[in-house]
Amino acid sequence: MEHIQSKINMLRCPDCNFNTIKLESSEFLKCENCNEKYYILNKNSANLLANKNMSTTKREIQRFWGDTCKQWYNAFDEKLDRNELEKHLQYMEEMFSYRKHLAVTEMKLETLQGLDVLEIGSGGGAHSAHYWLNLFFKGVLTGAIFQYPEYEWLGRITEGKPVYGETRNPVTRVYSRRQLVSLFKKYKIISSRKYGFDFGQLPIIGKYKIRTSLLKILGHKPHPGGIIVYGAPRLCGSRLELFLSQFVGYSWAIVVKK
Ligand SMILES: [Zn+2]
């Protein structure tokens, strides 16, 4: 609680944007301007998600990812205890290191010690050159490109289909380096790089099977680190894919300073 109290001046109300959040009791924070309550989860954290003024798009993003996470993790979550979780986090870190993932390259744990971390996102970040290699063709083939604005058709054709609900992923954005530089113009860009390419992303029929067979012939084994991220062990990239990632990687890793 002291921890939350000491950071309270940094917070803004996610509903009305005023700097008026106060610690009301041991159970919740309250905004003095709009009276919204935000529940305290444990002594160091509170749930500061907007309650009432969430746009329809944001609500749909939430519903889509809720559906996806249920598909990926439910079976695994049910048998998870603390020891299992720690073991799998270790596997995940090893897998991320091999794949040069942002979370272990740009944000090494020891460099975060003593800092105030506002949020750690879950995703691989903004998509990049993937656009011309894969997404553009999918958009044309499904016809989605002719029906919706860019961020919407990209949302529809990426990230899979819902199983439990009706919501399609409503928004996915793709950025070139030039667009990123303009987006972060108020910041100093310390570094930016692409990562996360594999041949399964190319618009070729049977691509996943072809890639899996090839990697297995070359002696690659599925990495257990994939279980906690994708719900199943993951065939990590070959050396060639890791090399190509810097040019046509799926994700951006960006470090900026204000
Ligand atoms: Zn408020």
Image (tube, rainbow, N blue to C red):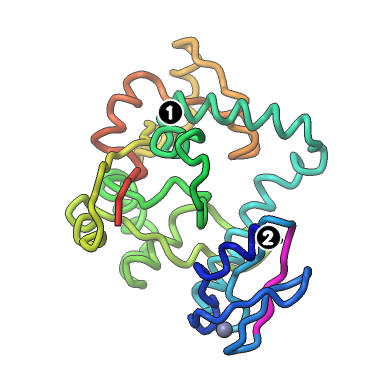
Measuring from the top left, give residue 188's x and y in whole percent.
23, 53
Magenta stretch holds residue 41: yes
Lateral position of residue 45 relative to residue 59, left or right: right
**Mark 1 sits on what residue?**
99
> Image quadrant of ligand 1?
bottom right
Q: Residues within 10 Å of mark 1 (few under 14, many from 20)?
A: many
Residue 152: which disc? none
Measuring from the top left, give residue 176's x and y in whole percent.
22, 52
- Dominant SS type (magenta): strand
What residue occupies the far left of the structure in this picture?
A: 178
Establish if 203 lies above or below 208: below
In this rendering, the count of numbered labels is: 2
What residue sits 67% from the left and 55% below the top?
44
**What residue span does the magenta drawing correspond to?**
36-42
What residue sits 53% from the left and 49% below the top?
122
**Mark 2 sits on what residue?**
2
Q: Residues within 10 Å of mark 2 (few under 14, many from 20)?
A: few
Q: CA distance from mark 1 to mark 2?
A: 38 Å
Q: Quick one: quadrant of the C terminus?
A: bottom left
Kind of element beneath mark 1: loop
What residue sits 52% from the left and 84% below the top?
16
Establish if 135 lies above or below 87: below
Measuring from the top left, give residue 211's x and y in whole percent.
44, 26
Establish if 19 lies above or below 40: below
Magenta stretch holds residue 64: no
Kind of residue indicated by mark 1: Arg
Q: For residue 51, what is the image quadrant?
A: bottom right
Kind of element beneath mark 2: helix
